[in-house]
Image (tube, rainbow, N blue to C red):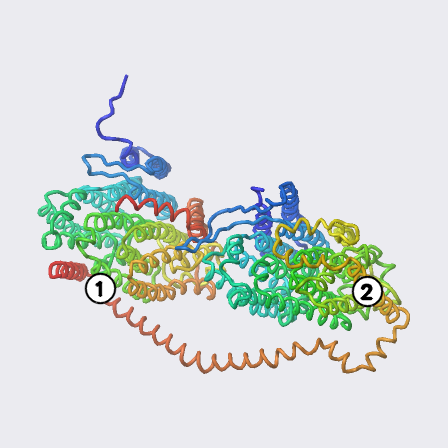
Amino acid sequence: MDWIIPAVNLKLILPEIVVCLFAILILVTDPFLSKERKIWSAHLSWIAVVIAFIANIRLWNLQEATFTNMFLVDNYATFFKFIFLAGSFLIILISMSYLKREEILHGEYFSLILFSTLGMMLLASGFDLVVIFLGLEIMSVSLYVLAGFKRSDLASNEASLKYFLMGAFATGFLLYGIVMIYGSVGSTNLGQIINHITSNDAGSNLLIWAGAGLLLVGFGFKIASVPFHMWVPDVYQGAPTPITAFISAGPKAAGFAALLRVFLFSFTTIKMDWTMIVWIMAALTMSVGNIVALAQSDIKRMLAYSSIAHAGYVLVALVAGGETGVSSALFYLLAYTFMNIGAFTVVIALGRKGQDNTKLEDYSGLGSRSPILAILMTIFLFSLAGFPPTAGFMAKFYVFGSAVKSGFTGLVIIGVLNSLISVYYYLRIVVLMFMQAPVTRTDNERIKVAFCAILVLIISTWAVLQMGIFPQSLLSLAQASVSSIF
Amino acid sequence: MNYVYLIPLFPLLGFLINGLLALSFKTRSDEKIPGMSLVSWIGCGSVGLSFLTSITIFFKLLALPAGERVVQKIAFPWILSGTFHVDIGFLLDPLSSVMILVVTGVGFFIHVYSTGYMAEDKGYARYFSYLNLFTFFMLMLVLSNNFLLLYLGWEGVGLCSYLLIGFWYEKKTASDAGKKAFIVNRVGDFGFALAVMLIFWTFGNLNFTSVFENAPQVLAFGGGLVTAITLLLFMGATGKSAQIPLYVWLPDAMEGPTPVSALIHAATMVTAGVYMVARCHALFLLAPISMGVVAVIGAVTAIYAASIGLVQNDIKRVLAYSTISQLGYMFLACGVGAFTAGIFHLMTHAFFKALLFLSAGSVMHALAGELNMQKMGGLKKHTPVTFWCFLAGTLAISGIPLFSGFFSKDEILWKAFSSSSGHFLLWLVGVITAGMTAFYMFRLFFMVFLGKSRMNPHVEAHVHESPKPMTIPLIVLAVLSVIGGYVGIPKSLGGSNRFEGFLSSVFEGGHEVSAEATAHAPSAEYLLMIISIAVVLTSIFLSYRFYIKNPDIPKRLAAKYKTAYNILSNKYYVDEFYNKVIVNPLLNLAWFLWKKFDVLVIDGTANGIASLVKWGGGVIRKTETGYLRNYTLSLIFGAMLILAYFILR
């Protein structure tokens, strides 16, 4: 019997289909799994991610739109999907032992991670503001639930509620922006918008400008840029640690995927010069993130502010614009995914049931208690601070380099001063780990790290060093990804 | 030849594995050194495999027609930034193939020797990991196809030298010597780094082939720029190859384990400067002034170090000064345009000096670490293998006909005399140095192996020949020291100088300059040869009179010429001079900058800014109230600002 393939090219959305089907499969099968076998859901979910990754590889170098031009597969989207899938894969691995330890191992956790990943993938591929909105909501709603997944923990509940309320509020701005743009262009398709802007005198059209401004607010919330960053510390601190790592990696990158595409492709700077406002946002985001991180005493909160600061660095790349700017942003987000997840993995490894051990003084003397964990943490922190030969250094180097090339030297000076400040709080942990005696504590037993977490540590370390020492291969991949959006 | 990357890769893997083993052993505290045989196999095996690969590649290179023996292999691009492009790339040509053979070959035997020599050391795995790391960097240095990678190897071997000199770091003198070597080298490396930057600034490129090909067009012959570049390069070489004025670290470097002295401070690393000058001959030939400087510094260093060697009593220090002196010969050769002769001497010197050091190590092994030659003597009957090997090395370094040193040294002397940029005085200095060399080497030989025993009686009771892992490398190197010169028998002696023929494609430019050498009659070459042989034999005879026949002559001479003796035995007071004129003023300046400038001005500013920033962090942190209403307010506030900006543009 012959199958008639429908008009929609299914191959293009195969990764999304795989992720979605597996997410549903997990939801359906989970109630029938006995308590000892709940871990099967986790295995199903990473298998889904791996299959989607492979399906995604087959889309490399393909440039095709489908669903009446609403869904675009190009190298830009494909590259971002690699980041999301890699991030989700690592998060699933570190979640398994964490959930077991906290005794909250339920299948829907993994299902929600998959759904959230699906949302991110739609964000990257969306060529229509409606699809982008859809992706954003699929991603965010799953995250709201995940942030409150430790149901018995008040902090987790608080994080979830705050995240949800603020997120809903910001989504309102985004939606309103879309409406305004639709009102003036008559379409939500990015291609139509750029046509409209270039063919008309859009500079005087207030509606489009207002719409762009509201979109910037909506995306600014997702990427946690100042002044839309207030939710970040509370949510990061309260959410289960793997989810904190997840929020800081994938969804942030997804927010950037949509932001970069919409602003650089549709609101082309030649017609609409919005660089100044993003310049200010970038400067503020870097400065506030780094300066407040100095005053933190909890590592999750510190990493939350550090994540705000890193969003600022990526905004510098958006200001720089052009192919070098965007490719450096992609490289940065890839590097950040690995170094950040790596650091969070160490944070998780130090926790106990019901006791997260996320105070900075919990890191005193880690160098003597568990030298390998301490060395790996040092590598990740060095990378976050931007020391060679790590990924963080090369990423900053490319971002700042592209900004200098586009003539934004002032912003780069602010950025470099900021990374100087950041060195203080990153290295403070290194100092605590290696140069201070451990605090006297009751549970001085050996730190046991689960096999999956070890795997994540190995992958992240390898990636951080690979991108720091031989950045060329991944950078050229990022460079090959950006030509399609210009 | 596609597998050239394997040559440095094996030692790198060896380093990684042995380094990890060294780390994991450290946590245990058993009496016996764990995993020793594994470490030995990895350490020696990795270098042995590189040696085999090098041999294969050498013969493949030999099979190519003479004009095509330049092969570049790019492993991968290393740095790409704008127009700045550097590859991890390898350049295989006759010059680098000779160097890899010397490094891996001599290196392999020294590794084997070390398994015996270091057998009772706690840091056995650490030692081998350093030694492998050194081999890796040295191979990168000689195989590199660009200046930056060369510089990487250059710094890498410097690092390993530091680590290995200070290997017994609990000993203050050893760690001090390591620091001294590192700091003195830094002075030279500074020049080298400047040279690399100048080259990039001039050529926009760091690749050897393209720099050397473009050099004649870009740089004016004898111009200021090329002179500056070459002098700065040579400054780097004086540091690494221990020439005046930066030689002072090498005698102190003898604090390291003896195989290290043999490998790093005799056979390979210290010759890196000679290799670099030879590699850059295209630039040096454009700068006659620099060539003159190289030749004169080489000659002066040769005679200067040899004169100090005459009166030293520490067996390893004699050899150290001898190394400095022999390196001077090599630079003398390069300075007169005879690069082939320089590299030839580099190779033969690697054989016989490694042999001499390893033999000295064997002597120390026999005498429980004794270094003072005054407390040796008559070792011949106790350690026959070492005796014969040492004799072979001594004959080779003294330039006795038919031994390897004779051919290479004589070629240098002949070129120093006959080359268009040579000079009679350079030759004369060379011959006198040859005489001194023969004198102090035989003095050493007589005092250690012949004559009456002056050993401490209870040391003498335990004197023994070294174990097989140590004697076999000695025998191999002794054979090489004897026959190593036969690849370069000069034409005047009926040979065909195959070595020169092999290297000629690299040094075509150098050949032209020394082409006039052939204009001199062969009779002149014979005459010079006979003179130098006569000087050497006389010196040996004198040495025999002084130290075997009439052992009290030296004492009487020392008493009679007290000033001269004191100057020599105190090494011309150069260390003291450096301390007074350079080190102490620098220390004072540093103290002032630290206490006055740094603490007050710099730290004050930095701490001030830091507390300001921290205070700011505290203030902004207060906005983080935890109340949703404040958060939404901030969001709305931001949204309004953006909208206002966009609308009111």
Instruction: Say few, some or many: other residues with alpha carbon within 10 Å of mark 1 (under 14 / 14 to 19 / 20 or more).
Output: few
Query: Residue A142 at x, y = what percent?
Result: 24, 44
Q: How many marks?
A: 2
Secondary element at image label 1: loop
Query: Residue B294 at x, y = what percent?
Result: 63, 66
Secondary element at image label 2: helix
Mark 1 / mark 2, whichever is N-terminal = 2
Instruction: Say few, some or many: other residues with alpha carbon within 10 Å of mark 2 (under 14 / 14 to 19 / 20 or more).
Output: few
User: Which is more toward the observer, B511 or B598?
Assistant: B511
The answer to which quarter of the image holds residue B462 is bottom right
Query: Residue A331 at x, y = what percent?
Result: 35, 50
For the question of whether residue B35 can be seen, the reply is: no
Is A311 placed left or right of B183 in the picture? left
Query: Residue A233 at x, y = what percent?
Result: 27, 58
Q: Nearer the viewer, mark 1 or mark 2?
A: 2
Is B58 placed left or right of A255 in the picture? right
Identify the image quadrant of the C terminus of chain B: bottom left
- Residue reaching furthest top? A1
Which chain is disc 1 placed on?
A: B
Vertical placement of residue A178 versus A412, above or below: above
Mark 1–mark 2 distance (CA, rounded to whole Å): 94 Å
Give me the disc on residue B85.
none
- Callout 1 and callout 2 share a chain: yes
Give me the disc on residue B531.
2
Residue type for callout 1: Thr
Task: Tell me the residue that label 1 is attached to.
Answer: B625
The answer to which quarter of the image holds residue B557 is bottom right
* Residue found 81% across the figure and 62% down from its top: B527
Residue type for callout 2: Ile
Identify the image quadrant of the N terminus of chain B: top right
Is A34 placed left or right of B30 in the picture? left
For the question of whether residue A189 can be seen, the reply is: yes
